[in-house]
Structures are given as C-alpha cells and as structure tokens.
Image (cartoon, rainbow, N blue to C red):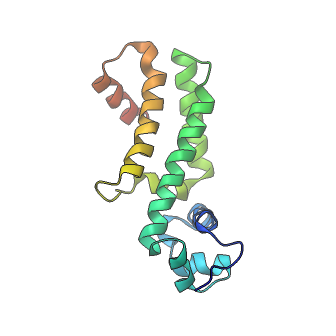
C-alpha cells in the first residue's frame, strides 16, 4: 500500500502529541490520530506499530524534548541557579505539554534500548545539574525523584 504524501512517522507522532496535550493521555487512540491526519486508522500501521507503537514513539519524543528543555535551561548555570533553571524548565514542559509529559510516566516495554537511553539522558542531565553539590549518585537519584 502506498504511503500518503505528507504523512510519515514524525507526522503521526506529532499528531498524537497534540491530541495527548489537548485532550489527555487516555484520549489518545488510533481513531483520533487518523482523524487528525485525515487518513483511515489502518493507514497508520504503515508508519507505526498501532497504538502501542504510537505511545512508544510519543514517550521517546517526550523524553528527548524534555531533556532538550532541561539542558537549555541549565547551560552555563551552577548549583542553585542551575536547580532553579531545571525546576522552571521541568514545570514549563509539564504545563505546556501535559499529555506528552504523561507519556514519560507510563512504564515502557522492558528491554527497549531506545527508551532506556532517552530516559537515561534525562537522568544524566539532572545529575549533572546536581553535581555542584557533590552528592553520591544514589543521593542524586533520590534528589531527582524528590524534585520531580
């Protein structure tokens, strides 16, 4: 089956992100994404592995976008200024992308190296911000959980 011009994996995931942000994570369905893209639901399978695939891709997008926002907010800052920048960026991301952020909180399939790597980058960015406090890694992880 030929792929529709203008529809690709990125377009599907971005449409899913818009739906999740506007209507909530639980409102995300294949039918909603297909309607938004003006295609039939089965056509989405040319680009993603059904709803599970869309949710996985949305989780990856959310983790990468969150990490980018956190990194940008903390570059050139240290200690308290960096933590404030991190907190403000985290809050802004959640506020402006509630459904996308919800994707980061949903358990991913086990042994998914791409998701593990993307989540690991967020953790490493946060640990980097906390490095000025000379915390042990375990203490840093607890601090990240508390801040989140």
**Which residue sits at x=51%, y=72%?**
27
**Which residue sits at x=36%, y=50%?**
113
Instruction: Give how far across and how far down residue 33 sits, in percent.
Output: 58, 75
Q: Residue furthest right?
A: 6
Quadrant the C terminus occupies: top left
In this view, 109 is above or below 67: below
In this view, 76 is above or below 7: above
Can residue 81 be seen here?
A: yes
Total numbered labels: 0
Q: Residue furthest front?
A: 2
**Which residue sits at x=56%, y=35%?**
70
In this view, 26 is above or below 86: below
Q: Quadrant of residue 10?
A: bottom right
Nearest the viewer among 102 and 41 is 41
Q: Quadrant of residue 5?
A: bottom right
**Which residue sits at x=59%, y=26%?**
74
């Amino acid at each position: 089956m030929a792929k529709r011009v203008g529809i690709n994996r990125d377009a599907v995931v971005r449409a899913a992100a818009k739906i999740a942000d506007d209507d909530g994570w639980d409102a995300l369905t294949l039918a909603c994404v297909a309607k938004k893209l003006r295609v039939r639901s089965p056509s989405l399978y040319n680009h993603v592995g059904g709803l599970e695939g869309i949710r996985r891709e949305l989780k990856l997008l959310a983790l990468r976008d969150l990490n980018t926002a956190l990194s940008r907010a903390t570059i050139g800052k240290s200690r308290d200024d960096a933590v404030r920048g991190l907190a403000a960026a985290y809050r802004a991301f959640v506020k402006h992308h509630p459904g996308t952020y919800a994707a980061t909180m949903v358990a991913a399939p086990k042994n998914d190296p791409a998701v593990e790597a993307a989540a690991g980058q967020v953790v490493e960015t946060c640990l980097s911000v906390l490095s000025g406090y000379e915390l042990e890694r375990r203490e840093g992880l607890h601090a990240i959980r508390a801040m989140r």
